[in-house]
Image (cartoon, rainbow, N blue to C red):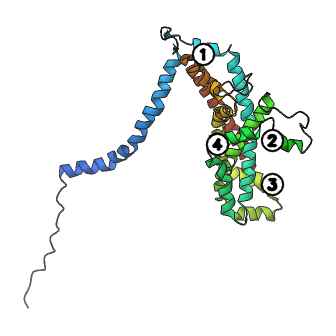
Amino acid sequence: MSLTAPPRPPAVRRRPPDKPQRHWLYRFDVKGTPYLLIAPFFLLFAVFGVFPLVFNAIVALRNWRLDDPDANGWSGFDNFSRLFTDEDFWNALFNTFGIFLLSTVPQLLLALMIANLLNRRLRATTWWRVGVLLPYVTPVAASTLVFAVFFTRDGGMANWVLSLFGIGTDNPINWRADKWSSWIAIAMMVNWKWIGYNALLYLSAMQSIPKDVYEAAAVDGAGPWRQLWRITVPMIQPVVVFTVVLSTIGGLQLFNEPMLFDENPAAASGGSAHQYQTIAQLIYKVGWKDLNLGYAAAMSWALFLIILVVAGLNALATNRLSGGGRK
């Protein structure tokens, strides 16, 4: 019997170390490429977002009139202090908040109701969902001009509809003459355009709510109205807060609708007595009609701070109200 040596295990082939150049490219691909891909956004934001804000802040602290280049220099906070005694600014602020309340509150409530209806089983569901979005895709200039004709004093369809109920038969309403009538007309333009958009946002959030939640609520005796406010609204709370903030920003920056509703849009006066002139219109008038860029920039910053405060308060209030149904 011969003794033989045991077989040798196969040699393990070691991986050669990476070359320094390959290792550097790998680190750049993992750590540097993501920053390279998102860099264009931040570059564009810096050029078209940050720079205009900084430059506008500088202009707000200066005397800058295009009609008098010699009257140039630092004014400090004089432009801002002037706002407290400017009757046109407070009138425009009052008009802006009036139109904002008449448009935003009914707009979001109606959007919520429409979304709740579209969330049910309906025939031609896709057709209805596309139909509510048509006002949003309509150009604002075209829709506003149509509404301007609709609210004409003589021969307008608004007065014709009211006359069917005996309102304004002998004395048709001049929608552009008074504050309340012009506010209602402009608010209807805004609501017509944005109700469908907000309704689809609410509907997309409602689609994620499990159906068994509604079935359990129905078994417990909760009707459709109570299900809406006790189940649907609290469960789509983030979207509700988003639409409230978005509507606040858009409502306080209202410009196109009152501008085109005016019979003389070039003046940017918001009516003969500034009865529906918004802050955005006043900023445009002061900056590009009166050529006082310094004061217009101060108004822009005042509007920015107002929007920031109102949007924050609305978001806080909506968050508490819509979240209260969970308790």
Mark 4: amino acid:
Ala
Asked whether the residues under the numbered discs 4 and 3 touch, taking CB atoms below 8 Å apart as contact, a structural biologist would say no
Give me the residue at 59% from left, 17% from top.
Answer: 290
| Screen quadrant of the N terminus | bottom left
For the residues carrying marks 1 and 2, which lies nearer the camera in this image? 2
Location of residue 36 in the rendering, given as x and y in whole percent from the top left corner: 35, 44
Q: Which residue in the protein does label 1 denote?
A: 80
Q: Which residue in the protein does label 3 denote?
A: 226
Asked whether the residues under the numbered discs 1 and 3 touch, taking CB atoms below 8 Å apart as contact, a structural biologist would say no
**Residue nearest the observer in this picture, 146 or 218:** 146
Mark 3: amino acid:
Arg
| CA distance for labels 4 and 3 | 40 Å
Give me the residue at 19% from left, 55% from top.
Answer: 18
Query: SS class of the residue under badge 4?
Result: helix
Q: Which residue in the protein does label 2 denote?
A: 158
Report the side of 138 relative to 106 (left or right). left
Residue 156 visible in the current orientation: yes
Query: SS class of the residue under badge 3?
Result: helix
Q: Residue furthest top?
A: 70
| CA distance for labels 4 and 2 | 18 Å
Q: Earlier in the sequence, mark 2 or mark 3?
A: 2
Residue 142 - label: 4
**Residue nearest the observer in this picture, 323 or 292:** 292
- Above or below: residue 18 compared with residue 97: below
Q: Earlier in the sequence, mark 1 or mark 2?
A: 1
**Residue nearest the observer in this picture, 17 or 313:** 313
